[in-house]
Each structure stands twice: as structure tokens, then as C-alpha cells.
Image (cartoon, grey):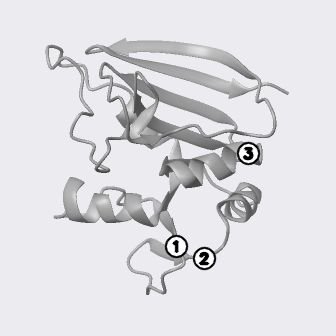
Amino acid sequence: MRKAVLYIAMSLDGYIADRNGGVGWLSGHGTEQNPGSYDAFAESVDTVIMGWNTYEQIVAELSPESWAYEGMQSYVVTHRKQAGKDGILFTDVSPVSLIEQLKQEDGKDIWLCGGASLAQQAIAAGMIDMYRISVIPSILGGGIRLFGETEQERLLHLKDVQIYDGITELIYEKRE
């Protein structure tokens, strides 16, 4: 069965965006040429799920010239009625239901790319199989927090730690 992977970056104090929703702080020291884990990770997934705000940030700010997830089936979870386009489907299905459905289909792993609400719903439902969290060497002091309060403790197993350019990537699997 496919795995749902939360692959995301956060500040040292747990934020995925600053107080204005910005991500300009998402960088390491800038002293190494190591590209990190993205390329290898992208080869392991063929589906990406995101919320509307993440989608808007990608198309308006981060990658306005071309779709950043070309070749992957992309789902944007939103209540806005929007026509799909070239590999991007807009859906009002709950993130948990969508992940449950996609896990039953053939394919590579499923990437939950953002944002916080989508991630928190999937975490609360126990749908995340692997957490790949890159801790950026920044303390924001406020913004959009990755983890919210949950009703149930989630036990994880540390699988690997990678360090590049001052960024620490923590890789955890769900403990059964």
C-alpha cells in the first residue's frame, strides 16, 4: 500500500510560514552546494496534496512561470469551485478521505506538501505514515504553526537524520 508522507520544512520553533504567511526564510546557511533530499524524495512520490493557500503561494510567488510539481498528480483541497488543469485537480473532499482513497490506488507514495490545516487533519486521523521534516535554522517567534493540539499522542520511530547547509532533516515513521 502507498504511504502518505508529510515532507515539509519548519522553523526551529515550529512554524511553516511567518506571521504574514511568507516563506522567504526557507534557506540554510548558503555555504554548501548540497541540494538536500528533495530530488531523491520527488522520485519516490507521484501524487501531491496541498491546501488552497499553499497552491496560491506556489503559483503566485514560488513558481509562477511553471507548475512546480510537473509529472505528479496534484490535488488541491479547497471549497472554491475551480476547474482542473493539466495534472491539477481541485477537490472539496476532506484531506483524510482523499488520503484514504489514494492509499488504495496503485502508485508511488503520496506527498502532503502543505499547509498546516491539511497536515493537522491528517495527523489527527493517524494518516501520516512518514514525517520528513526539515528544520530550518531560523526562529520566527510567530506565524503558522505546523503542529496543533491533538486528542491522541502519535508515537514515531526515528529512521534517519540528514544535515545539509545548516538544515536538519528528521525522518520519522509511524510506530505501530
Q: Badge 3 is on which residue?
A: 124
Q: Answer with mark 3 or mark 1, whichever residue precedes in sequence.
A: 1
Q: Is residue 110 visible?
A: no
Q: CA distance from mark 3 to mark 1?
A: 19 Å
Question: In the drawing, does residue 146 fall left or right of residue 15?
Answer: right
Look at label 3 and name its amino acid.
Answer: Ala
> Residue at coordinates 48% horizontally, 51% vertically from top-left?
115
Question: In the drawing, does residue 47 fall left or right of residue 174?
Answer: left
Image coordinates for residue 9, horizontal then vertical, percent: 41, 34
Q: CA distance from mark 3 to mark 2?
A: 19 Å
Q: Residues within 10 Å of mark 3 (few under 14, many from 20)?
A: some
Q: CA distance from mark 2 to mark 1?
A: 5 Å
Q: Residues within 10 Å of mark 1 (few under 14, many from 20)?
A: some
* Circle 3 SS class: helix
Image coordinates for residue 102, horizontal then vertical, percent: 69, 60
The mark total stands at 3
Q: Nearer the viewer, residue 64 or 37?
A: 64
* Circle 1 SS class: loop
Q: Nearer the viewer, residue 92 or 20?
A: 20
Q: Answer with mark 3 or mark 2, whichever residue precedes in sequence.
A: 2
Q: Answer with mark 2 or mark 1, whichever residue precedes in sequence.
A: 1
State the mark number for residue 78: 1
Look at label 2 and name its amino acid.
Answer: Asp
The part of the image, by quadrant, that contains residue 128 is top right
Image coordinates for residue 34, horizontal then vertical, percent: 24, 19
* Circle 2 SS class: loop
Look at label 1 and name its amino acid.
Answer: Thr
Q: Badge 2 is on which residue?
A: 92
> Residue at coordinates 43% horizontally, 71% vertically from top-left?
87
Residues at marks 2 and 1 touching, judged by CB atoms closer than 8 Å: yes
